[in-house]
Amino acid sequence: MAINNPIKEIANTVIFHCQHIETTHNENETPLNTARFCMGRLLERTTNHLNALADIAYDMGDGDLARYIQIQAERSEAGFTPTPI
């Protein structure tokens, strides 16, 4: 199970990056349409990254971690910023 800790760290890094970009848009008062477009693209990429990491965790035998990552991928796909695992 210790092998999968790096997968969790990578997933959290992806999530923290997404949260950072969202915060940056808010703090810089990015125009709404621009922020929506940029966040939409970012959430799409985040979803793809998290889905890949969930697959890796599952393949390595950690179904629980895979499910936690998948939940955050589903949040991202629904348009919500994921939360750390």
Image (cartoon, rainbow, N blue to C red):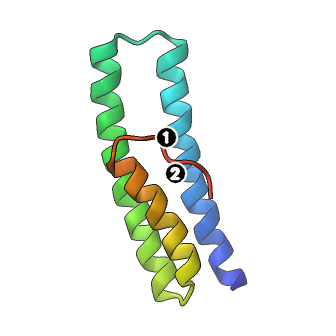
Q: CA distance from mark 2 to mark 1?
A: 6 Å
User: Looking at the picture, which amino acid does disc 1 mark?
Assistant: Cys
User: Looking at the picture, which amino acid does disc 2 mark?
Assistant: Val
Q: Residue at x 38, y 66 (%)?
A: 51
- At label 2, counting other C-alpha atoms closer than 10 Å, the crowd grade (few under 14, some 14-19, many 20 or more) is some
- Say which residue label 1 marks: 18
Residue 3, position in %: x, y? Answer: 66, 82
Q: Are marks 2 and 1 in contact (CB under 8 Å)?
A: yes
Q: Residue at x 72, y 82 (%)?
A: 2
Examine the image and state in which quarter residue 68 appears: bottom right
User: 49 or 26: nearer the eye?
Assistant: 26
- Say which residue label 2 marks: 14
Residue farthest along the bottom direction in this orientation: 61
User: 74 or 7: nearer the eye?
Assistant: 74
User: 9 or 67: nearer the eye?
Assistant: 67
Q: Give the side of residue 76 with respect to residue 17, left or right.
A: left
Q: Residue at x 50, y 47 (%)?
A: 82
Residue 6, position in %: x, y? Answer: 64, 70
Q: Give the side of residue 46 with respect to residue 69, left or right.
A: left
Q: Quadrant of the N terminus?
A: bottom right
Q: Is residue 74 above or below residue 66?
A: above
Residue farthest along the right direction in this orientation: 2
